[in-house]
Image (spheres, grey):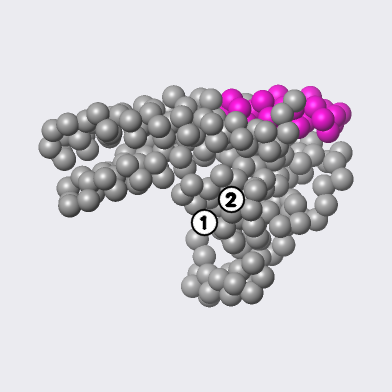
């Protein structure tokens, strides 16, 4: 059985392979910027879809391992979750390929790497969170991190457990954090704080954003 950190390391190998595949493909492209963008719009979603199978399967296996460790009384088997984000991925690829039309075409590789890493890691996190919401024995999930930015450290602080089923996994480009399911038989500790829930929201009012920034600067 893999630990949370071992599963996180395995996810980094999967996302790294996906990034390498797309960046290598970019390096082999020729033709006009329009032609290269057109090819990237086909290549990138296909590569992400391929590696997302591995990302989501890795998460499902980890979920089942954690569940077996906790040994809750009810039977449940995790299902890999891969949301259809083709349209959003293509929009992101169009943004990433913008430098091909300017005087710094080399910047396209870095942008593409951000898109591919984020989108390939997403099914892992979605698999953990979706199964947690379906599993009657799960009480929530916690963030697994090795430090990282102020926001990631704050969101993972105290091993906080996100029990609200609507809680979102906040992730930024190159974010290496993962999620770990928590079960009712665990000694799981404290629920996430109000500020941690605010920080996990997809949209925040200017007032909440300012309050969060002040909190991060003061405490992290």
Q: Is the magenta stretch mostly helix, strand or loop?
A: helix
Could you tell me which residue is drawn at 56 percent across and 52 percent down? 170
Question: x, y (%) of residue 216?
Answer: 61, 68
* Tag shown at residue 27: none
Q: Is 109 displayed left or right of 184 in the figure?
A: left
Where is mark 2, residue-wise?
168
* Foreground residue among 183 and 215: 215
- Contact, mark 1 vs mark 2 (Cβ under 8 Å): yes
Give the quadrant of the N terminus: top right
Q: Does the stretch in magenta take in 122?
A: no
Could you tell me which residue is drawn at 26 percent across and 45 percent down? 106
Q: Does the stretch in magenta take in 61?
A: yes
* Foreground residue among 98 and 82: 98
Mark 2 residue crowding within 10 angstroms, few (<14) / some (14–19) / many (20+)? some
Where is mark 1, residue-wise?
202
Q: Is 86 displayed left or right of 154 in the figure?
A: left
Residue interval drawn in magenta? 56-78
Q: Is 168 displayed left or right of 25 in the figure?
A: right
In the picture shown, does residue 204 fall above or below 53? below
In the picture shown, does residue 218 fall above or below 186? below
Tell me where residue 19 sits by quadrant: top left
């Amino acid at each position: 059985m893999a630990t949370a950190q071992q599963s996180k390391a395995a996810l980094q190998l999967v996302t790294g392979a996906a990034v390498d595949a797309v960046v290598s493909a970019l390096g082999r492209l020729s033709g006009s910027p329009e032609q290269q963008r057109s090819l990237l719009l086909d290549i990138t979603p296909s590569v992400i879809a391929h590696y997302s199978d591995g990302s989501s399967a890795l998460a499902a296996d980890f979920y089942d391992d954690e569940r077996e460790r906790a040994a809750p009384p009810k039977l449940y088997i995790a299902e890999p979750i891969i949301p259809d984000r083709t349209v959003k991925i293509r929009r992101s690829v169009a943004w990433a390929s913008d430098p091909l039309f300017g005087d710094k075409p080399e910047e396209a590789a870095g942008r593409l790497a951000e898109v591919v890493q984020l989108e390939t890691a997403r099914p892992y996190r979605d698999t953990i969170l979706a199964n947690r919401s379906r599993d009657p024995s799960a009480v929530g999930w916690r963030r697994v991190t090795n430090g990282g930015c102020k926001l990631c450290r704050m969101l993972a602080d105290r091993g906080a457990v996100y029990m609200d089923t609507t809680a979102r996994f906040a992730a930024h480009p190159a974010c290496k954090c993962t999620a770990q399911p928590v079960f009712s038989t665990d000694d799981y500790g404290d629920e996430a704080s109000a500020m941690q829930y605010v920080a996990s929201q997809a949209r925040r009012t200017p007032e909440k954003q300012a309050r969060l920034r002040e909190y991060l600067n003061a405490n992290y």
